[in-house]
Image (cartoon, helix red, strand yellow):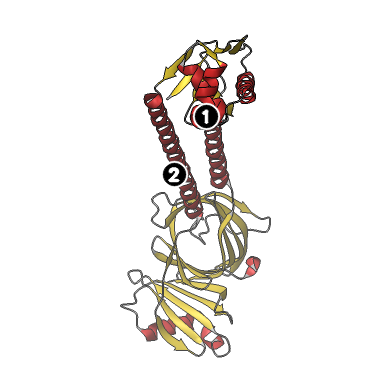
Amino acid sequence: MIRNAKIIIAISFMVISLGLILTYYKTKRELVGSCHFYLHETKTLTKETIRLSVNYFLYSDNTGFKTEIGSFISHDKRYTIDRDIIFTYSDMDHDGVYTVSVSKENRRRNDNSPRGLVSSSSKSKNKNYISFNKIGNDVYYIQERSLPYVICGKKAGLLN
Amino acid sequence: MFYIINDWIRFTPDSKQLSSLKDEEIEISLSNQSARLLMEFIQHGDAVLSREHLLKNVWENFGLTPSNNNLYSATSELRRAFISLGENEKLIVTIHKVGFQLATNVTLIESDFIESEGVEQKKETKNKAINNSRVYFIFTVLLLSLSAMSLTYFKWDKKIKMKEYTAPVIEKVGKCNVYALGNLIKTTKEQVLENISIHTDIIDSCKSQRYDIFYAVNENMSNYILIGHCEVNKNNNHENCVTTRVIK
């Protein structure tokens, strides 16, 4: 009886420990991906140019943010872009296509770019769908709704 | 086969052992002469046995020299053994000028059935213990496997799923490689190089620095071009990636 009680106590201890460990891992927030790119975007029709330095950070709790610093030139008028965009991402069906939803946009004081400026996948309130491809050592090709979106590297800018 | 003396003392003639049924841990081994003496008492129930009878049947018949000293010594050993087992009453009584008497009841137990039952019971208990151990072992292994799988799942689940994509080299320019991302069916190699030259100045840099240049276009939306280039360092790692997007 005493032996059985000891075994039951040991098993209970193991089950509780397992539960605590799993809870810890499930709720622990850690960086699972980051990359950097410079973006030069030219819209010839509207004569608009965007030049940005972008850092991407993805965390294990399905949140992430990106920093955008650069400029936007429209009809010879120059604007400054300096903001952090906070988003959530998920891949419920595990097909490698992530649904990204912007939850907050923090503009810095010197950011005077027009509202509604679309420089990235996650600017609008709409959901966007992105997938990641590794195309070389520390270099990634990100697609948005199967369209070419950006080439992103590990080392540069803030990530150095 | 064994005898129960006074309802609680067990005597096993084969092993010449006395033991207590109250406490199985207490066991006393008797000498040959004491065991034979006790057996002689048992065989005659509560009859008073004369010294002569005892000396003859316990010693002389076995080729040993009979003596009163041996008799007293064996009787004394038996009394001490009973006391050691916890018996307070005097079971072997001296009858003055006559002899000795085992003044208690003795029961013969044909122990084969009981012992075999005991063995079976022990086997069953042992098997049960082994079965229990197996169940606990399997349960522990399952639990540990489940833990390992859960941890692996949670760790794996947190990683960003990434497809490995080997882009084909479509051209080499100086120290640079130009790769195509996706199929370029309607776009020729010359058009790719022309677009790279028009929209970036990377081709000039290829004379002195190694770059990987990636070209992608959605051929159904020919007004959208993506040109990415990254410096390639000595370790073949990519740095300072620049993406040029042209939307016509």
* Amino acid tagged 1: Lys
Tell me, for residue B16, which label it has, or none: 1
Q: Residue furthest left?
A: B185
| Secondary structure type for disc 2 | helix
Q: For this rendering, which residue is in front, A153 or B190?
A: A153
Give the CA distance from mark 1 to mark 2. 51 Å
Q: Position of residue B71 (x, y in %)?
A: 60, 22
Instruction: Determine the residue positioned at 38% across, 27% down.
Output: B112
Can you see residue B9? no
Residue B22 relative to residue B137: left or right: right
Instruction: Determine the residue positioned at 49% across, 20% down.
Output: B40
Q: Residue furthest right?
A: A109
Q: Say if labels 1 and 2 share a chain.
A: yes
Q: Chain of mark 2?
A: B
Quarter assignment of residue B171: bottom left
**Which quadrant is home to the C terminus of chain B?**
bottom left
Tell me, for residue B88, which label it has, or none: none
Q: Chain of mark 1?
A: B
| Secondary structure type for disc 1 | loop
Figure check: A48 above or below A7: below
Q: Tell me the mark number nearer the camera, choosing from 1 and 2.
A: 1
